[in-house]
Image (cartoon, helix red, strand yellow):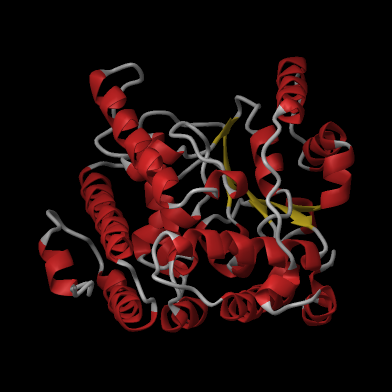
Amino acid sequence: MDNSLNINNILSSIRGNLGEDDYLEPLEILIDSLNKEANLSFFGSLGAKFQILNHLKTRAKVFDYISSNSLEEPSPPIFVMGLPRSGTTHLFNLLNQDDSHRSSLFWEIMYPLPLSPKGSFARRKELLKVKLILYFKNKVIPGLNELHYMEATSPEECLLIKALSLRSLVYVYMANVPSYQAYIQKSNSLPAFVWHKRFLQCLEAQEKPKRWLLKDPGHLEHIPEILKTYPDARFIHIYRDPSETIPSICSLTSTVRSGFSNSSDKSLIGSQTLEFWKNVLNKYSSNRDNIDPSKIIDISYEDLIKNPLGEAKKIYSHFNFDLDIQTENSMVSYLAQSKGDHKRKHIYSPEEFGLSKEIIQNELSFSTKT
């Protein structure tokens, strides 16, 4: 059975104006890579097509909305970043206990428009659709929740927002697409943040926060693009021994790809993952000095795990944010609850992916605190 994706069939399914043509080149490269390199299963092909169509349909709705409305500049953003599996999600969820912070939720990324009031039938319908997507996701990719837990109403990473420009790591996790992976690391990434900003502007039309709280490990390599798009951005960088994070990233990639591909090469995942994040950290190291020191703070994974509330207070002090007693109590409650959540431990090793701690540390020794 032919599982090939066809760009003309995909584009003919989109109603509305997709805006600038910045999506065409990455879309062509992505589809070519999926067809020739990914070894997609039948269900993988359907899943990839669904993802691409959903991102393009959302893009058309966003473009229609921003073209029809006069929108303000987004509220100041905070970017939480660090290698995947380095505690970014834990800190992200902790800081989300502050009502001053607003993050895009998973259901909003999937179906942001038309804007629907809280409690409305339209909102309930959107939530139901997303819950069904997550249900099938858990059936197709069992075990993913142990690595990256998602609910319809949980705050989600920006890599799904950046997919509006068809420049996103989400497709790299999904399938072996080396040509596309090389492209997104070398191409102009500014369009991804143009659409990122437009997306936030759409959400703000209904609820404008005091600050945006955003997260994506990939933000590490896009400091120039972020500063150009959001001159008032602040950054929280979490650092952890890469020999602990890289094998976990490989495990996540292998788990996701198992739901989309007929087979996957774990050694190839290991070498591609190591090379990809080496490139990311090289870019971050080159561009970090462009950030005003008052706009960035470094947090170690070990300190975050030992004293999360203390690290949160350190962040608030560095950025001169007010930490009121209500927010502090919410953080304490969250930490107590998360401490009681016992998830099945996911077991993996660097050797499973053709790596070793020594290889990883030698390649990524510069990824420690700058």
Instruction: Name the foreground residue: 336 vs 61.
Output: 336
Residue in view at x 69 percent, y 79 percent = 354
Q: Could you tell me if residue 219 is visible in this image?
A: no
**Quadrant of the rendering where the C terminus is positioned:** bottom right
Left or right of 98: which side holds 156? left
Q: Quadrant of the N terminus?
A: bottom left
Residue 285 falls left or right of residue 206: right
Residue at 71% across, 41% down? 91
Q: Position of residue 257 (x, y in %)?
A: 47, 64
The one of 281 and 171 positioned closer to us in this rendering: 171
When the figure is inspected, residue 323 is found, relative to residue 9, above or below; the finding is: above
Is residue 331 among the parts visible in the rendering? yes
Q: Is residue 354 above or below residue 11?
A: below
Closest to the observer, 333 or 314: 333
Q: Nearer the viewer, residue 175 or 290?
A: 175
| 232 lies left or right of 340 | left
From this view, report whether residue 46 is shown above or below residue 327.
below
Q: To which quarter of the image does residue 250 belong? A: bottom right
Relative vertical location of residue 32 with respect to residue 171 in this rendering, above or below: below
Residue 256 pos. (x, y %): 49, 59
**Residue 278, image quadrant:** bottom right
At x 31% / y 29%, what residue is drawn? 128
* Residue 274, image x, y percentages: 67, 77
- Residue at coordinates 63% horizontally, 32% vertically from top-left? 96
Q: Please tell me how many numbered marks the rendered image carries.
A: 0
